[in-house]
Amino acid sequence: MTEATYTITYLAMDGRPDYPRPAARLNDPIALLRAEDPPVWYFLSLYGAVGGPYEWTDRFRQDPEELEAFVKSPDVHLYTLMRNGWPAGFFQLDFRTEGECDLAYFGLVPEAVGSGLGRWLLQTAIHMAWDGPGVKRLEVNTCTLDHPAALPLYQKCGFTPYEQEVATRVLSSSS
């Protein structure tokens, strides 16, 4: 078993960004689909496909009833980025706290990393979050176990760090 120390960075945005909503990518066969009342297995398949290389394992160990309540909440919106007929990434917007939106999950599957879709998907997610009713603050967090481009991308897209926390965990790949 290998234990890793990592840093979690919490970021926020207190107003809609000044850049426009990203334009459609007309030469790229993509679609962004919202899952209505998604089954937990669908969320977990995206979560695992995107987060597997980055130690996203917590949701697999979560109490099944709590996980289902999160995934099926009408205030938690799950969007899948489809490219060439297969899921290339996803994001999840959590509107359960009044006046806030948490970008709970965001990422691309390994086969889509480096395709130029990351910034487009993040900026789309940001604008969709700000379209939510009464949103005054948008939050996200990332950690040093995530893709090394995650933190700089969040900052380039308008998020500002407001807190950091050091944590440890046993890496699943060493079990």
Image (cartoon, grey):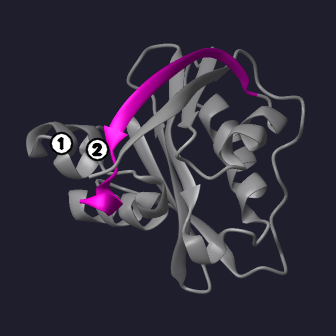
Q: Which is more toward the observer, 93 or 64?
A: 64
Residue located 69% across and 20% down the image: 161
Determine contact: label 1, label 2, CB under 8 Å. yes
Q: Amino acid at mark 1?
A: Gln
Q: Is residue 98 above or below residue 127?
A: above
Mark 2, other Cα within 10 Å: few <14 / some 14–19 / many ≥20? few
Q: Is residue 24 above or below residue 133?
A: below
In this image, 66 relative to 146: left or right?
left
* Image quadrant containing the C terminus: bottom left
Q: Which is more toward the observer, 99 or 110?
A: 110
**Magenta stretch mostly in which secondary structure?**
strand
Q: Is residue 82 visible?
A: no
In the image, residue 130 lies at what x, y percent?
66, 29
Q: Which mark is residue 58?
A: 2
State the SS at label 2. Answer: helix
In this image, 12 relative to 48: left or right?
right
Q: CA distance from mark 1 to mark 2?
A: 6 Å
Q: Amino acid at mark 2?
A: Asp
Residue 165 magenta: yes
In the picture of the structure, the residue carrying the numbered disc 1 is: 62
In the image, residue 101 lies at what x, y percent?
52, 26
Mark 1, other Cα within 10 Å: few <14 / some 14–19 / many ≥20? few
Q: Which is more toward the observer, 30 or 89?
A: 89
In this image, 66 relative to 170: left or right?
left
In this image, 148 relative to 82: left or right?
right
- Region rendered in magenta: 159-175
Location of residue 17 by image quarter: top right
**Direction bottom: furthest residue:** 84
In the image, residue 15 lies at what x, y percent?
75, 18
Q: Which mark is residue 19?
A: none
